[in-house]
Image (cartoon, rainbow, N blue to C red):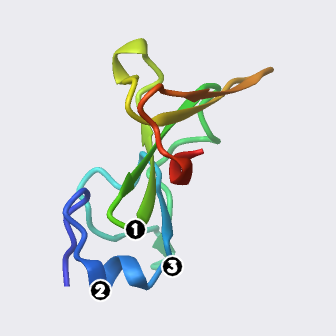
C-alpha cells in the first residue's frame, strides 16, 4: 500500500500513536535501491545530516505531525510551532496561533 505524504489516512497514523515525524530525504526514485552486493540500501548517497534543520510542528485532529521543511524564513508561519536545529545552537519558536499540543 502506498501512502502519500500529507494525506495519511487515520488508520496509518494510528500505527505511530499520536505523533509522527517526517524527515526530508529518501531515495530519488521513491523505491528501494540495492548495492553491488545485493543488500538493500537505506541511504541515497548523502553523508550525514545537514548542518541546519527546521521542523514544522502541526496538530491536525488529534495527531501531531513534525515535518522537516527547508530551513528558510519562508517556511515559517505564525499558526504553528517550529524547532530549528543548528550546528551550534537550537531554537524553538511558538507562533502566536499555535495550540497546546504543538508546544
Mark 1, residue position: 62
Q: Earlier in the sequence, mark 2 or mark 1?
A: 2
Mark 2, residue position: 11
Q: Position of residue 76 (x, y in %)?
A: 40, 23
Figure quadrant of residue 30: bottom left
Assign a secondary structure to mark 3. loop
Q: Earlier in the sequence, mark 1 or mark 3?
A: 3
* Residue at position x 25%, y 59% in the image: 5
Q: Earlier in the sequence, mark 2 or mark 3?
A: 2
Q: Position of residue 35 (x, y in %)?
A: 46, 67
Q: Nearer the viewer, mark 2 or mark 1?
A: 1
- How packed mark 2 is, by other alpha carbons closer than 10 Å (few <14, some 14-19, many 20 or more), is few
User: Which residue sits furthest top?
Assistant: 73
Assign a secondary structure to mark 1. loop
Q: Nearer the viewer, mark 1 or mark 3?
A: 1
Answer whether labels 2 and 1 touch (C-beta < 8 Å). no
Q: Position of residue 65 (x, y in %)?
A: 43, 56
* Residue at position x 78%, y 21% in the image: 89
Quadrant (top left/top right/bottom left/bottom right) for the C terminus: top right
Answer whether labels 2 and 3 touch (C-beta < 8 Å). no
Mark 3, residue position: 17
Q: CA distance from mark 2 to mark 3?
A: 10 Å
Q: Position of residue 67 (x, y in %)?
A: 43, 47
Answer whether labels 1 and 3 touch (C-beta < 8 Å). no
Assign a secondary structure to mark 2. helix
Front in this rendered view, residue 10 or 100: 100
Q: CA distance from mark 2 to mark 1?
A: 13 Å
Q: Which label was assigned to residue 47?
A: none
Q: CA distance from mark 1 to mark 3?
A: 10 Å
Quadrant (top left/top right/bottom left/bottom right) for the N terminus: bottom left
Figure quadrant of residue 51: top right
Amino acid at each position: 500500500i502506498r501512502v502519500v505524504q500529507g494525506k495519511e489516512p487515520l488508520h496509518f497514523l494510528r500505527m505511530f500513536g499520536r505523533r509522527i515525524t517526517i524527515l526530508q530525504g529518501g531515495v530519488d526514485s521513491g523505491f528501494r535501491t540495492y548495492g553491488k552486493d545485493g543488500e538493500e540500501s537505506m541511504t541515497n548517497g548523502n553523508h550525514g545530516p545537514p548542518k541546519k534543520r527546521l521542523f514544522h510542528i502541526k496538530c491536525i485532529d488529534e495527531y501531531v505531525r513534525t515535518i522537516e521543511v527547508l530551513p528558510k524564513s519562508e517556511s515559517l508561519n505564525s499558526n504553528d510551532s517550529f524547532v530549528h536545529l543548528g550546528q551550534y545552537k537550537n531554537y524553538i519558536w511558538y507562533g502566536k496561533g499555535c495550540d497546546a499540543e504543538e508546544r
